[in-house]
Image (cartoon, grey):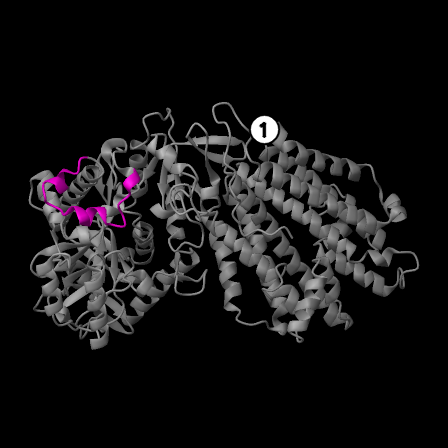
Amino acid sequence: MLSRVAENLYWLGRYLERAENIARMARVEHEVMLESGQEIWHSLVSTTASNQLFWDQLVESPDLTHSEFLIYTMQNPASLRATLVRARELARGLREHISREVWEEINALYLFLALRKEYIARDIHEFCTETQRRTQTILGLYDNTVLRDEGREWFRCGMYLERADMTSRIIDAKYHILLPGGDSVGGPFDRFQWTAVLRSASAREAYRRTGNSEVDGIKVAELLIFSQEFPRSLAFCVQALQRHCQLATAETPNRRRAAAERGIALLHLDIGVMDMEQLVEEGLHEFLDFFQKRLIDIDQAITDDIFRAVPDAEPGVGRFQRQSQTATGIDQN
Amino acid sequence: MANEFLHDYQDSGPSSDEMFDETGAFRDDYRELGEMLQGWTLDDHLQREERADLALLSAGITFNVYSEDEGTERIFPFSLIPRIVGAQEWSRVEAGLKQRLRALNLFLLDVYGDQRIIKDGVVPAEIVLSSPGYRPEMAGFRPPLDIYAHIAGCDLVRDDQRGMVVLEDNLRTPSGVSYVLENRTVMLRVVPDLFPRWGVRAVADYPNQLLNMLLSVRPNDSGDQPRAVLLTPGIYNSAYFEHSFLSNQMGIPLVEGPDLTVGDDDVVYLRSTSGLERIDVVYRRIDDDFLDPLVYRSDSLLGVPGLMRSYLNGHVTLVNAPGAGVADDKVVYRWVPEIIRFYLDEDPILANVETFSPLVPAELDHICARARELVIKPANESGGYGVLIGEQASDAELEDTLTQVKEDPRNWIAQPLLQFSTIPTFDGDRLKPRRADLRPFVLSGQDTWVIPGGLTRVALREGSYIVNSSQGGGSKDTWVLNEEPG
């Protein structure tokens, strides 16, 4: 498969998954805010790692709200809207690799966003719900209408890598509640927060189904990190990433796939030999931080060795002129 | 006419109309359609038009407009009333186009070969060699099957006296065929009831014909399974939709410059996740100037370094051949009837529009004296840019253009203002006459094939002569009627 196409499919998977996560988190945060009266959008801004940018933008437009920044402004490259605009741009360049149904749904979502000429705070809920529903429709259509070839495996790699990253950030945003001496551990506000975490990860039903009734921070974190059954947990995502990466690289020479596969396998092993008790002892935040860094390394290995490798000399081919990589509309954020 | 929106259909003065004759009655080929339309209410029409627009928008069948912000997309305005071409008339057009392309390909072979036509004094040397489309590095090179202009789009208009005439040839990277195919799809969905009893000639075979043609011109040293790719400048190009559409329909990779690389063996390779794969034919949708930064513009990021070396050594075929533009130069166009007679010893089946070149002294005098009756065009612009219509221009505009013509006669041509025919086109609440042209596409490889019909472009403003999409033109489906079963 053409390297650029593989890379763009991988990023299409990442962006769509990211958009779905942002929409879901924003919807939950919005409800929590309405109910609790507490402005907690800032934690979401840090979940998407855009704190500095937010403050920079605030200097330019003092009326900017956290929610507008997170959902709507194109100045924030990680905003929901910016993410979807880029997904659609990639999809335009991939039309022959995705089904017409998937393309039309991505394009319809783009037109839905384009029709919103301005940000309207009271519409956040409807806006996010609709975006989430449409994004999920796209992911579902992708699974059911697109040929299961190498490209689809790259799409899935991107999707699971992004999902692992987002779930880890969702937990990380609330890790401080688990710290000894944290505010009102186990109190009603604490439960309220962890319920929001579960909903942010679409995990409320899964949590109950796995035999838990009382909402408890440790158990929530355990489900979201270690569950083999819950499709958004870190363990599940890493395992899926490993499977799809193996399928995607079936025809890739060993030396080009080695670093990525080694990185994924090691991360898989590391999660497999840990438990929750150990994590709390050694520091949940440190673990999540480490986990995110490992994902960055894996992404780097896939990008450098597989997508953008300059071919070595091969018999009959010889030396190659190195060409500058054109921008593919991709950022590494 | 009882129908509310066919009511008051105004004849647009000097032009004839495709649907109605001078007495206001339906022409034969349009009778069945016209009678059907008379049964429609305004609402019927509006609803279907809306459904068609929605189908095009949601499918992302859009083009970018250069004069607006980058990335601005618009749908190509689509008009439901089709253009109809009768079976007999079509066979004449088809034969005429095949003849024309045969002659133009022989002309290109000659220009880059012995230059007999220049030596015999039929076409002046300075006109050929000074054409911006002329590529000296092609001299002495013979492409596979001696074909240069593999894909051609010839713009036809109907003139009262002579029927269909050729307004211009596009032999570099003509675009628009995807709209032909998509317009038909939309029509079949939205107005299935309008299609005539004996049906119309299908256009859907184009991608197969195109792929067969591409593979038929592969280089001599290619293996058992030759591979073609479509080379695009990328998603910001105005015709990107078409690039994606065609590569998808043909099942060949859509590539950008950096996706290809040329080895020391001068073979072109595709960079894939599993390694390098040989490419035999490149259907390039980028201009000559950007093909290869080692030969042409060194600042081009769109092309592939070494591509021309590979081509000239016979390891890859470029479609269309670099340098084919010399034959669609608007000044060279003036000599196409002579070109047809010279190589084929036949009279042209399809006439040219009468054209004056300021390089010929008598013709320059004519241009200056009769400027008000002429259309003065830059010879090497496309998309309708820089065209001056004498009748509509201000004195200052006219003066300015004539000065430019005298200063740089090689760069201009003039033609009489053609009162080319109109087709009923919906505007506001009724049908109005709007001028239209027709661009059929001709494929030349092992065989020559003409798409039945082509892209009908229509001026959407009253009285306008400019049909280009970038200038607010729209498009229509084109129906070539099947012969009625005897």
Q: Which of the 4 quarters of the picture holds residue B217?
A: top left
Residue A11 placement, left or right of A237:
left
- The residue stretch that appears in magenta: B114-137
Q: Report the residue marked by disc 1.
A: A253
Q: Position of residue B74 (x, y in %)?
A: 40, 62
Q: Point out the image quarter for the C terminus of chain B.
A: top left
Which secondary structure lies at badge 1?
loop
- Quadrant containing the N terminus of chain B is bottom left
Residue A331 in the image: x percent, y percent? Answer: 60, 52
Residue B362: image x %, image y %? 8, 60
x%, y% of residue B44?
A: 30, 67
Chain of residue at mark 1: A
Determine the image quadrant of residue B410: bottom left
Q: Amino acid at mark 1?
A: Pro
- The residue at the point 56 percent across, 43 percent down is A7
The number of numbered discs placed on residues in the rendered structure image is 1
Task: Please tell me which residue is depicted at 53% across the width and 69% down the height of the picture.
Answer: A116
Q: Is residue B157 left or right of residue B286?
A: left
Q: Between A158 and B328, which is closer to the camera in this rendering?
A: B328
Can residue B215 be seen from the camera position used here? Answer: yes
Judge whether A8 appears above or below A266 on screen. Answer: below
